[in-house]
């Protein structure tokens, strides 16, 4: 007699192949931290829980190119694409730091179609 094939998935939590349902998040906060060496974009809900994040380094830029506006634009686009799929329509934008990526990240946020309000940090 052949052995039974085990189910794929964790045995501990009892779910076999079931995915976690995506939460609907209508409003959030986009944090942009722009230093001279890198730009980090974090998207949170209104309570401060991180939904999505990206940086110029995770987008494949290395060395001095991480501090460029184009790298910041790419990082912001990657971070925002995930939350737009989850239904985010409005956001507050908080920008911190003196880096060149400030304008590039803001340009990507504006192009994404999310209605945003700029908040001084």
Image (cartoon, rainbow, N blue to C red):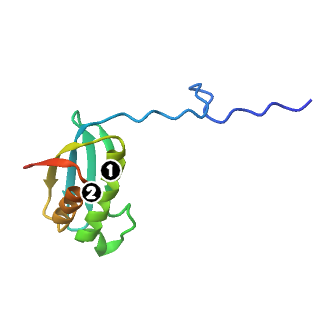
**Direction from residue 61 to residue 45 in the image, left or right:** left
Spot occupied by residue 116 in the image (x, y as percentages of width and height): 16, 48
Residue 49, given in percent of the width and then of the height, sits at 29, 37
**Going from the N terminus, do you reach mark 2 or mark 1 first?**
2
Q: Nearer the viewer, residue 72 or 117?
A: 117
Residue 32 appears at what percent x and percent y?
Answer: 21, 54
Residue 77 vs residue 4, the one in the foreground: 77
Residue 40 numbered tag = 2
Please state the total of marks drawn on the protein image.
Answer: 2
Residue 81 left/right relative to 101: right
Determine the image quadrant of residue 97: bottom left
Residue 45, by quadrant, is top left
Determine crowd level at label 1: few under 14, some 14-19, many 20+ residues with C-alpha closer than 10 A.
many
Name the residue that disc number 1 marks: 53
Q: Secondary structure at mark 1?
A: strand
Q: Residue at x 24, y 60 (%)?
A: 108
State whether residue 6 is above or below residue 116.
above
| Residue at x 38% of width, y 60% of height | 58
Which residue is the extreme one toward the left? 120
List the single residue furthest toward the bottom: 64
Q: Are marks 2 and 1 in contact (CB under 8 Å)?
A: yes
Label 2, secondary structure: give it: strand
Instruction: Give the distance between the C-alpha atoms of the residues marked 2 and 1, in whole angstroms.
Output: 7 Å
39 up-or-down from 64: above or below: above
* Residue 96 image position (x, y, % from top left): 14, 55
Residue located at (22% from left, 61% from top): 105
Q: In the visual, does 10 lie left or right of 22?
A: right
Q: Quadrant of residue 101?
A: bottom left
Q: Residue furthest front?
A: 113
């Amino acid at each position: 007699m052949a052995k039974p094939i085990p189910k794929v998935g964790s045995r501990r939590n009892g779910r076999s192949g079931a995915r976690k349902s995506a939460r609907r998040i209508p409003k959030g906060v986009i944090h942009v931290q722009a230093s001279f060496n890198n730009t980090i974009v974090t998207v949170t809900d209104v309570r401060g829980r991180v939904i999505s994040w990206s940086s110029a380094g995770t987008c494949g830029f290395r060395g001095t190119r991480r501090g460029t506006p184009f790298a910041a634009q790419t990082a912001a686009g990657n971070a925002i694409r995930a939350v737009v799929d989850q239904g985010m329509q409005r956001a507050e934008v908080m920008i911190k730091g003196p880096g060149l990526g400030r304008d590039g990240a803001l340009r990507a946020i504006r192009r994404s179609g999310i209605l945003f309000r700029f908040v001084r940090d």
